[in-house]
Image (spheres, rainbow, N blue to C red):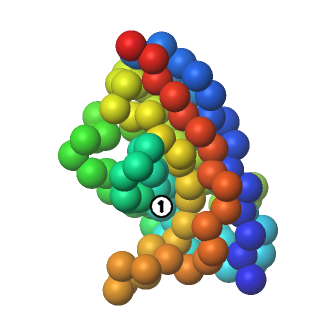
Amino acid sequence: QVHVVESGGGLVQAGGSLRLSCAGSGSAFSSMTIGWYRQPPEMQRELVAWVTSGGTATYVASVKGRFTISRDNAKNTVYLQMNSLKPEDTAVYSCNSPTSSGFVYWTWGQGTQVTVSS
């Protein structure tokens, strides 16, 4: 059973930066692909970046070049460094492990709120 705690969100001006953390518990966490998802107000949740257990990172077009996902398996933690933030990045950010069928492995937590002001 994996449990995670997301942190690092906040209010930032456009062009600013934030680093989010996803701290996982359970021995399986370090062997799983972990993704960062975001849900803007009144919109569907979307996967924006993911990293394999070996450290290979993938991004969606809207964040590529601005966001960097990384992991420290010794600390069971996955990070999302967000630079050049835009108002459209405003969302609740959560981490989870995507399955091949498009679902996720564990129940969503509270996530961490990121608000970017213009």
Identity of the residue drawn at 68% across and 79% down: 28
Give the image location of residue 80, x and y in percent. 52, 43
Give the image location of residue 68, x and y in percent. 43, 40
Q: Mark 1 points at which residue?
A: 35
* Secondary structure category for the residue under label 1: strand
To which quarter of the image does residue 9 belong? top right
Name the one closer to the observer, 96 or 28: 96
Residue 67 vertical placement versus 27 (above, below): above
Tell whether 95 sits left or right of 84. Answer: right
Q: Residue furthest front?
A: 42
Name the one closer to the observer, 9 or 65: 9
Residue 75 vertical placement versus 7 (above, below): below
Image quarter in which the N terminus is found: bottom right
Q: What amino acid type is highlighted by mark number 1?
A: Gly
Residue 66 vertical placement versus 49 (above, below): above
Identity of the residue drawn at 67% across and 55% down: 110
Asked if residue 16 can be seen in this view, the reply is no
Identity of the residue drawn at 63% across and 74% down: 107
Give the image location of residue 31, x and y in percent. 59, 76
Image quarter in which the C terminus is found: top left
To which quarter of the image does residue 40 belong? top left
